[in-house]
Image (cartoon, grey):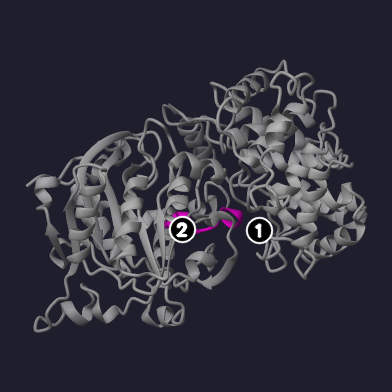
Amino acid sequence: MSSAPMTRRTFVRLAGASVFAAYPAAVLPGTPGQSDNPTVPRALLRVALAPCPDYGPDSLAGALRTGWRTSQPPDVGGKRVVIKPNMVDVSADRPIHTDPRLIDALILHLSGFGPREIVLAEGTSHNRDAEWLFRRSGYEALAKRRGIRLVDLNYDDIRPVACVNPRATLLKEMSLPETIASADVLISVPKMKTHKLAGITLSMKNMFGILPGMVYGWPKNTLHWNGIPLSICEINGTVKTHYSIVDAVVGMEGHGPIMGSAKKVGVLIMGANALAVDATAARVMGVEPSRVDYLAMAHKIKLGSLRAEDIAVDGERLERVRTDFALDPEYAHLRAPRG
Amino acid sequence: MTDPRLSRALDFIKAHQNPDGGWGYEPGRRSLVEPTSFCVLALLARGESAAAGRGSGFLRSCVKSSGAVGIDPKDPEGSWMSYAALLAFHAAGAAEDERRLKGWILSFEDASGRFTKDEIAIVASRYRYDASIQGWAWTPRTTAWVEPTALVILALIRTGVASTEKRIKSGIDLLIDRKVPSGGWNFGNPYSKSYELEASTMSTALALAALGAAGVPKSRPAVAAGLGFLERALAGDVSTASLAWCLLALRGYPGAEAAIPGLAGRLARLQTEDGAFRGNLFETALAFLVLSDAPILGPSPREAP
């Protein structure tokens, strides 16, 4: 597996489509331009740890309001906003998918800023029966109630986009759903979970679901053949997630992303940089982010930073909300020491 | 066929043909091979040859030099949607396109030949299936899964390939091997380590439709358990496409549809005023074909391999 560096030049090639990643390397923490010059103040990435004890509408609205304010949120006024939840499958007794009550509260929250349109979009990974999954997850009823479009990304019109990684092979030309490619603001709203093939799954891994099944198959097997860490980095390097909200009110531990058990944490983790949000969420789970292959790779290619010293955490103190998730024995090495 | 409801479905299809002759999954969307193929099948079943001919023209624009068919004309290589194109070429009498596509499908390379012995052992231990069994994948050179294997078997048998053909036999072996122990099929992982994964309605319906078309009898435990799963699933909420595939699957096993009465009526009631099913052209064509019992898609029971 190669981990080719993604250069500014290759990012610039993609300029012009607002959702495509265009991380100006010079302003990212940890880049040579900053870390080598101690006189230049480091621009901290802001992440909010917003307490949210339950899925009640008041709890969610309060947490979103507080977290949003302190975590460099995108300007959504007049914009087309696409919300990408995580719905690899749906189960009556396991919290596999992002809770629809959080999505509902987010829609109400965003509506206050006057977006042009809000769209809820997902491309399920295992079961391609989206009609049934959307109904069973509660997303269909939610979309109807709020009058927003619900899009099955697996069968959306597609737009070819050059991968930001010049050495990419299987994802050299990515087929992106038009709904994603034409979004002004993309918000990733994953469920906090352990993952049998990636260790943990949060905002960056959630982006597997934007690639359409009709091109990449179910369970997006092309991405597995490409290598999971590399695929996560190539997707997140090419498609910019403008904001992430990790549903950690109740997460899933053990044999995720499907067969694990509910784990209550009671926070939302929010921020504009997906890597910083994921690194903070990993710490909440009792996981050392630098030991997670794809987070380490994303840090190395400067998709943001996973280093605690580059991230300003607002809201709850991380150590107070740290809730160690049971890890698959294969990923026991990810555990962060306490203290 | 004079049922006015079915005529309305055809009208919906005809009204939303794209200028390039094809259809997208929804009106106004770009033409793709799967919805176009099914719309062509529906039109041919009704003798609507002009619109079907334009649809076939779009399908021919998706044929590669290898005979493969991509998802659309720009797709650089063959795709899982080839199963649908094969059905359409056969129904349209496009013998040369059918022959070349069939050749590509029968020589389709999945990942089974690429796995090392160690990888096969890991898959056997983690997911409890035999990764060396050849089937069909969603995209070339990746892992074979239940649904593309089932769809291709359905199309090959419908177009006259014997169920004893070695690739079909291997595909049947794959389906049997990937069954979920408590009944039915999912996308293709019966287990994840010690956890049995749940079956799903659509995957089970497609696997059973393929096994029925290939003449695998109800007496086979996997088939009986799959039919039992479908019966339980059909007692609850089922999607439009799954319901249509379920009907097709049950028709492959004598007496199975009658054992769950009212399914065709249940599907018919999902049709909306405009003649569509869920506003989706593929699903409208599929429902039309199933409700009109068109032989163009139905299984052809054969002797057990």
Cα gap from disc 2 to disc 1, whole angstroms: 18 Å
Q: Which residue is mark 1?
A: B26
Q: Quadrant of residue A240?
A: bottom left
Does residue B16 appear to the left or right of A207 in the view shown?
A: right
Badge 1 crowding class, 10 Å Cα cut-off, few under 14, some 14 to 19, many 20 or more, is some
Both on one chain, marks 2 and 1? no
Residue that appears at 23% across and 57% down: A64
> Disc 2 sits on a residue from what chain?
A
Q: Which residue is mark 2?
A: A148
Judged from the image, the secondary structure of the residue bearing numbered disc 1 is: loop
Name the front one of labels 2 and 1.
2
Quarter of the image where the N terminus of chain B is located: top right
Q: Is residue B301 above or below residue A206?
A: above
Which residue is nearer to you in this view: B302 or B274?
Answer: B274
Residue that appears at 50% across and 36% down: B123
Q: In the image as oriented, which residue stretches furthest toward the left?
A: A339
What is the magenta range? A207-216
Residue that appears at 66% across and 56% down: B25
Place of residue A51 in the rendered image (x, y in percent of width and height, measured from the top left): 16, 49
